[in-house]
Amino acid sequence: MKLSDFDFDLPEGLIATRPARPRTSARLLVAGPDTITDATVADLGGWLRPGDRLVLNDTKVIPARLSGVRHRSGDAGETVARIEVTLLQPTPDAHWMALLKPLKKVRDGEEIVFGDALRATVVGRSEGQAELAFNLTGDAFDAALLRVGAMPLPPYIAALRPADEADKTDYQTAWARHRGAVAAPTASLHFDDDLLAQLAAMGVQFTHVTLHVGAGSFLPIKVDDVSQHRMHSEWGQVTAQAAAEINATKAAGGRVIPVGTTALRLVETAATDAGVQPWEGPTDIFIVPGFRFRAADGLMTNFHLPKSTLMMLVSALMGQQRIRDVYNHAISSRYRFFSYGDASLLLPEGAH
């Protein structure tokens, strides 16, 4: 497979820079093997059945973009450098790996100050990243980060506008629980409490899993031969309860439908021929056409970038020609694309 197999022309005007309001007013393209229906997210219940299970990623996005200063005393006196920091992922010893711009302006052991309460010491570096030890942890760290950090909007939005206070709510799911993501599981942004209650009342069930979405989600693929691409790694957890719930749904004949590619990648990581198993650790699963799905019966997801690993994933689920047809319809119907855009419900076996 070649990277060009997953390319398409997207008019720039279809890139969403703000979410739909209310969240459930976003458009929803429902695609079966040979049908396409235009709906809205508020209509989602019309395409689900009692006994279906939605798998939800409960990771919580942190305001991972920070602007700080480094002070240094030397022969030239006191010097100050402004350092832009993007947190990437926590380390096992409660430090953070981060991108620093410019990295060459700091040395190991130096401190970066992000305001009155928050500061970090550079304790090491590798592969263009720095390891930071912050002066705060736990709830105190979260509170300080909320005051001084900005949400890490995807590059294609950040290129069109800066992050602002609205993003701290807009770029967070209704069920966000476990801090650690630097990108949102964006299909989940379409849900609010009223829609969740409506679906629960009709017999749809929910299972929470955790995958901390990393900045690697936005890294371009640099090889034309797809088989040579090295997938980024992200930490995830499927609890014993989550695995049991998914397996019970499959056994009862219900459908398992992850909300978002992150939830799908995680449950397929944990899936075996004997069912989904409890699982915890880093996953670098790379889903391309030819992949055999063992857990997911469908997927709710946004519309993805050309030549991305996520285009390969939805092509694996629906078939390459079928997903081309779906995307051609979305573009001609002017659906809004990417993280703040509209949604699709992909059902390879049909809606009913």
Image: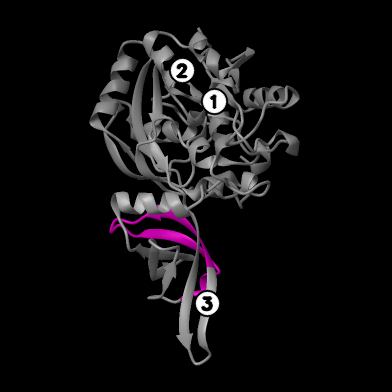
CA separation, marks 2 and 3? 50 Å
Q: Are marks 1 and 2 in contact (CB under 8 Å)?
A: yes
Query: In this picture, which residue range is highlighted in magenta?
Result: 83-106
Between 183 and 296, which is closer to the camera in this rendering? 183
Q: Residues within 10 Å of mark 1 (few under 14, many from 20)?
A: some
Q: Which residue is mark 1?
A: 23
Q: In this view of the protein, can residue 160 be seen by the observer?
A: yes
Q: In terms of sequence position, does the residue under pointer 2 or pointer 3 come before the other?
A: 3
Q: In terms of sequence position, does the residue under pointer 1 or pointer 3 come before the other?
A: 1
In this rendering, position of residue 238 left or right of residue 292? left
Front tag of 1 and 3: 3
Say what secondary structure mark 1 lies in: helix
Q: Are marks 2 and 3 in contact (CB under 8 Å)?
A: no
Q: Which residue is mark 2?
A: 195
* Residue 80: numbered disc: 3
Q: In terms of sequence position, does the residue under pointer 1 or pointer 2 come before the other?
A: 1
Q: Residues within 10 Å of mark 2 (few under 14, many from 20)?
A: some
In this rendering, position of residue 246 left or right of residue 154? left
Q: Position of residue 251 (x, y in %)?
A: 30, 14
Q: Position of residue 36 (x, y in %)?
A: 64, 14
